[in-house]
Amino acid sequence: MRIKYEVSAGGLLLRRRDSTYDALLIGRGAPPRVWTLPKGHVEARESTEQAGLREVREETGCWGEIITKLSEIAYWFYVGKAKHRKAVTFYLMRYLSGDPANHDHEVDDARWFDVAQARKTLKYVNEKRLVDLALDFLAANPTAFGEPALPEPLEAQAERVSS
């Protein structure tokens, strides 16, 4: 059996909104759509970072900057009689500019979701885990987006005061 190895990169693009974040997801297929994170093949002479930024821009219509590497996801699939192993490196990215309406022809929709809703909406468990990793990173690095830390939620303030 022939095995084909593929290398891809993509990202979780977040933007700040009040005391939370929005995540930009891509949707494919007729409604109900399959919602995933943008990703695609690493081209010749391109780093995974360059490919991740390019794929996010192409598939979402938005520009971002890499904050940190989140994880690599590897999986197997078949196309005809060929077995494929794909390794995808995902990055946490901060939104800079752009409009999801300008996504390319490879996706049917690109849309902002509240980060908690994005986690629920994502089709694949491994991508849901990437959201968890991103939120853990942001909790440990509150100024990672180059902005003031998010205010502590009122519930946490009240809990701390009452103890």
Image (cartoon, grey):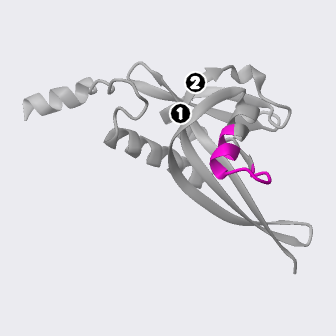
Where does the image place residue 135, in percent across and percent down from the top left? 42, 41
Instruction: Label 2: state its secondary structure.
Output: strand
Q: Which mark is residue 145?
A: none
**Start and end of the magenta stretch?**
41-53
In the orientation shown, which residue stands out farthest toward the right? Answer: 80
User: In the structure shown, which secondary structural element does the residue marked by tag 1 occupy?
Assistant: helix
- Name the residue located 70 percent from the left edge and 45 percent from the top edge: 51
In the image, residue 155 lies in the stretch drawn in magenta: no
**88, above or below 91, in the image:** below
Q: Up-down: is 97 above or below 139? A: above
* Residue type, label 1: Gln
Q: Residue furthest front?
A: 45
Residue for point 87% across, 81% down: 1
Q: Nearer the viewer, residue 54 or 38?
A: 54
Marks 2 and 1, how far apart at CA: 21 Å
Quadrant in the picture for residue 53? top right
Q: Which residue is mark 1?
A: 117
Label 1 Cα crowd, 10 Å radius (few <14 / some 14-19 / many 20+): few
User: Which residue is at 58% across, 55% downward?
Assistant: 126
The answer to whether residue 48 is visible is yes
What residue is at 67 percent from the left and 50 percent from the top? 9
Residue 32 visible in the displayed image: no
Q: Amino acid at mark 2?
A: Leu
Horizontal side of 130 relative to 38 (left or right) equals left
Quadrant of the rendering where the C terminus is positioned: top left
Looking at the image, residue 127 lies above or below residue 7? above
Q: Is residue 144 left or right of residue 103?
A: left
Q: Nearer the viewer, mark 2 or mark 1?
A: 2
Q: Residue furthest left?
A: 163
Query: What residue is disc 2 on?
Result: 96
Question: At which x and y percent is residue 37?
Answer: 65, 42
